[in-house]
Image (cartoon, rainbow, N blue to C red):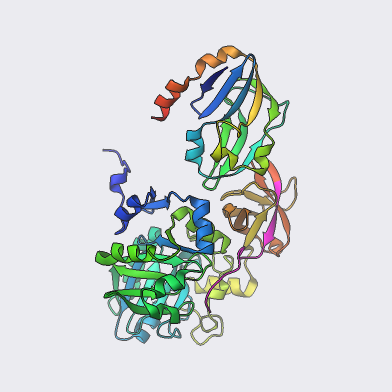
């Protein structure tokens, strides 16, 4: 089980060809208090760079961009009723999607934790 | 050199150091470094102001004194710039006003007060240079326009505001909504109005710069008083149904379309004793007679997704041209859901009318809602 990070402040924890995706604590802190999340449905396919959801905080709306190609296999339905979980535990209980990877070689374009820490300084 | 707007270019209010000490997250706003929030966070600060007492630094706003031969002379002159009854304003009272332009649009909104021998005006930070220039050009030399640059301005808002200020200067308790007074706070002369921008009871307090931090520390030491940033200031005023200049009103929106006709007293309206005589009077009177084609209304999105400034509004779920747009929107912590205001066609402006806002390509229901969203809690 390995965790990767994107420049758009998402984390992906990979087990085989399935993965769990969410936003980083740093992203959640920058967004401020989250009041709404718009998620896509299970079964939706997406391409790297495509919009796969929107998070609204008290300050602004922020798109979630797919860090690689794949398909949504499960949606964390709890977030719709409790969007503030994204502030409380964004790298744990407040995961956003389970996904199936189309091309695991795309993981090579993502960062490890040290790389991500360097990005956010 | 490029026009590089770094934080060093930003002006600081007399409370800048205190904001940093209190953990304020400073952002640029109207050329000033201002706290958008403190560690409590926007939602917590909003709720705190509704239930306890919030203290806001609004020193970036423009404070201006207008003097002349008498209050009456100043008031008559000022009435050439605003469609309000300035002459009839009693000493010790404040009123909401609008600077209009020749097309009947709104150049800024403001508060003005009869302080006995002079008129005291408070204008928006982003407009203050233009407002001062406008007043000087129109009113001098008969009226002297003096920007007050050596005083801070803070707002103390919420159900505990009276107790907090009265603990330091008991006469604050005797003031009613929109009263103004000069009070003494431990030897410091403060100019106080019982007003604000949250929908809660409270005060706006002008303090000599040299004493600003000391007075504010005394206020923060009172039971239940916490510093509040611009983030919560915006959600509070939005729930309170109040306009943000440059968003909900601007040079292209007239007072009637903006649903601010209540601010134009009868004496300045058609057939009033001092009807007209302000910029754009013909256009404003035409809107009074015929009604405006668009109206500013409250808007309550269904569901949980906020609809923010710029969202287009439609009559139907599909097709057709936009019939309006959102001018302010976000999450209302006291309402517990999204709230917005905007302009819609007058024929669709009745409370309860369901419209559709286009959010990320999808139209979602949004209903015309009475303003304010949260009942005002003023001390009348």
The relative height of residue B119 versus residue A48 in the rendered view (above or below) is below
**Residue located 53% across and 63% down the image:** B51
Q: Quadrant of the N terminus of chain B?
A: top left
Observer-nearest of A13 and B368: A13
Task: Indicate whether residue A46 is drawn in magenta.
Answer: no
Observer-nearest of B361 and A91: A91
On the image, which quarter does residue A21 sit in? top right
The relative height of residue B22 versus residue A20 in the rendered view (above or below) is below
On the image, which quarter does residue B122 sit in? bottom left
| Residue furthest to the top | A105
Residue B141 location (% of width, % of height): 27, 77
Stretch of the chain drawn in magenta: B364-380
Residue B22 location (% of width, % of height): 36, 52
**Residue located 54% across and 80% down the image:** B269
**On the rendered structure, is B316 left or right of B157?**
right
On the image, which quarter does residue A106 sit in? top right
Residue B174 appears in view: yes
């Amino acid at each position: 089980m390995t965790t990767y990070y994107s420049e758009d402040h998402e984390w992906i924890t990979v087990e085989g060809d399935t993965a769990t995706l969410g936003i980083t604590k740093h992203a959640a802190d920058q967004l401020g208090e989250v009041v709404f999340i718009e998620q896509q449905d299970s079964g939706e396919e997406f391409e790297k760079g495509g919009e796969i959801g929107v998070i609204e905080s008290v300050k602004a709306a922020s798109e979630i961009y797919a860090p690689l190609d794949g398909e949504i296999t499960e949606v964390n339905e709890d977030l719709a009723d409790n969007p503030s979980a994204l502030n409380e535990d964004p790298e744990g209980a407040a995961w956003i999607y389970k996904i199936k990877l189309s091309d695991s070689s795309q993981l090579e374009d993502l960062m490890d934790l040290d790389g991500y820490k360097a990005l956010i300084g | 050199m490029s026009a590089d707007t770094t934080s060093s270019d930003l002006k600081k209010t007399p409370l800048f150091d205190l904001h940093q000490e209190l953990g304020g997250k400073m952002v640029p706003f109207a050329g000033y470094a201002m706290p958008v929030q403190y560690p409590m966070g926007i939602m917590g600060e909003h709720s705190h102001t509704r239930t306890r007492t919030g203290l806001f630094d609004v020193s970036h706003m423009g404070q201006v004194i207008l003097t002349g031969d008498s209050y009456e002379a100043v008031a008559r002159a000022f009435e050439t710039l605003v469609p309000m009854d300035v002459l009839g304003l009693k000493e010790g009272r404040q009123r909401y006003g609008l600077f209009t332009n020749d097309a009947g649009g709104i150049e800024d909104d403001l508060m003005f007060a009869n302080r006995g021998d002079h008129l005291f005006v408070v204008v928006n930070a982003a407009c203050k240079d233009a407002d001062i220039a406008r007043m000087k050009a129109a009113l001098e030399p008969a009226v002297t326009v003096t920007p007050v640059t050596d005083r801070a301005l803070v707002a103390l808002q919420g159900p505990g505001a009276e107790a907090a200020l009265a603990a330091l200067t008991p006469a604050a308790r005797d003031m009613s909504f929109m009263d103004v007074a000069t009070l003494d706070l431990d030897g410091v002369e403060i100019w106080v109005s019982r007003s604000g921008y949250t929908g809660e009871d409270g005060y706006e307090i002008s303090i000599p710069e040299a004493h600003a931090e000391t007075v504010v520390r005394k206020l923060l030491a009172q039971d239940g008083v916490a510093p509040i940033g611009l983030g919560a200031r915006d959600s509070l005023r939005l729930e309170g149904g109040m306009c943000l200049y440059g968003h909900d009103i601007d040079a292209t929106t007239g007072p009637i379309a903006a649903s601010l006709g209540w601010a134009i007293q009868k004496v300045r309206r058609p057939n009033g004793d001092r009807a007209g005589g302000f910029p754009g009077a013909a256009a404003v009177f035409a809107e009074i007679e015929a009604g405006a084609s668009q109206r500013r209304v409250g808007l309550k999105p269904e569901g949980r997704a906020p609809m923010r400034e710029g969202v287009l509004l439609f009559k139907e779920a599909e097709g057709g041209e936009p019939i309006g747009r959102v001018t302010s929107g976000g999450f209302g912590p006291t309402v517990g859901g999204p709230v917005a205001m905007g302009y819609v066609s007058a024929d669709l402006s009745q409370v309860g009318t369901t419209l559709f806002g286009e959010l990320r390509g999808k139209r979602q229901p949004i209903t015309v809602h009475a303003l304010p969203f949260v009942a005002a809690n003023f001390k009348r």
